[in-house]
Image: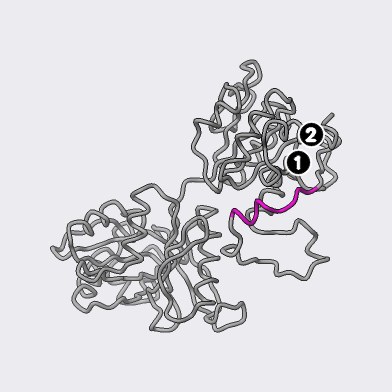
Amino acid sequence: MLDIAGELHRWFEQGRDFAVATVAAVSGSAPRAPGAALAVNDEGAAIGSVSGGCVEGAVYELCRQALQDGEPVMERFGYSDEDAFAVGLTCGGVIDILVTPVRAGDPRREIAMVLSAVCAGEPVALARVVEGPVELISRGLVVRSDGLFEGTLGDRAQLARTVAAEARSMLDAGRTGTVAVGEDGSSCGQPLTLLVESSAPPPHLIVFGAIDFAAALVRLGKFLGYRVTVCDARPVFATKARFPDADDVVVDWPHRYLETTHVDHRTVLCVLTHDAKFDIPLLKRALRLPVAYVGAMGSRRTHEDRTRRLREAGVTAHELSRLRSPIGLDLGARTPEETALSIAAEFIADRQGGSGLPLTGIRAPIHRDTAAVSAHTVLQQPARSSSSDTPQA
């Protein structure tokens, strides 16, 4: 549905009733992925597509009927369904379609909220029940990237928290698709299926310091789905030729670049400059920003000297507690690639609330309730030891 959010939002503003049909699940060969949508308003105008033309006519009629009835409906089209085959789905796949009516006089609040957020460019996810108790079908939550959520699943508070956690994880990854949860919010309850639609730009990883370790971290950051920027004040080192995988290579003083760059609570800052004239003004600024992670490379001796200089520069103990220095988890890393892995492992653990310990030796759940881990809580954890002590002098 979020692929046609702009037009749907205009219909809201015009006070129009409409019904939106969303691809909830696909199997086999299907032309559109989950989240694709077709909508029909009260004048019969249609936008979007759910099948590239195969079953558009039948879905159009479902939308018109839902507008009349005022009730959501799930419908399956596939090669095993004679009626569906008759209307043209001959590609051999199966698609499940969720049709939701939205009335201007009594709008579905969560749909209005998510469309408004998408049009404003805000990261947001809409999680709706597509398979489960009939009273929950099409009910859902709007989940923000900070884990806060709005909407209702009746009086099922634990289910709402679980749904919000799943939706936030998918939003962090920029994914749209289905996920199964227990009806009571646990992993062992009667299963129900959610369709989670995400709209978010990729999170931003900013690497300061155009060194060989930075090149490895850039490659890993891209693999993990981040938009990656390399920043260094030295034009001979900060070049696209040296960092072909980076989305942006910026030649500027790191602190000056950071002052003029938009960041949010998903932004990861990795300081690999390893030079006090760059590190101190940069970290003084970085530790006061609402970002997900601030890490700085260096040995323990370098860390102690850096900490002293930051205190002298007016950085408070609370702000210093956010700094991951020496950077990374203790993996015994030596090469740039291994060190990049130790750094990425740490900021992933921070984002997900992980301990960084081997799963073999802990009793905590493997999959955590990410909605309960706020950026503020994560950033107050004490600094860990680093696998990258040895490579840094």
* Relative side of 319 to 30, left or right: right
Q: Start and end of the magenta stretch?
A: 375-384
- Residue at mark 1: 325
Who is closer to the viewer here, 94 or 341? 341
Q: Is residue 81 a member of the stretch shown in magenta?
A: no
Q: Which mark is residue 298?
A: 2
Tell me the quadrant of the picture where the N terminus can be found. Answer: bottom left
Residue in the image at 77% along x and 33% along y: 308
Tell me the quadrant of the picture where the C terminus can be found. Answer: top right
* Relative side of 23 to 234, left or right: left
Q: Position of residue 195 (x, y in %)?
A: 45, 67
Going by the numbered disc 1, the residue's amino acid type is Ser
Would you say the residues marked 1 and 2 are in contact, meaning their CB atoms lie under 8 Å apart?
yes
Q: Secondary structure at mark 2?
A: loop
- Label 1 crowd bin: few (<14), some (14–19), many (20+), radius 10 Å: many
Residue in the image at 32% along x and 67% along y: 109
Who is closer to the viewer here, 123 or 218? 123
Residue in the image at 76% along x and 41% along y: 325
Going by the numbered disc 2, the residue's amino acid type is Gly
Q: Secondary structure at mark 1?
A: loop
Q: Is residue 304 above or below residue 88?
A: above
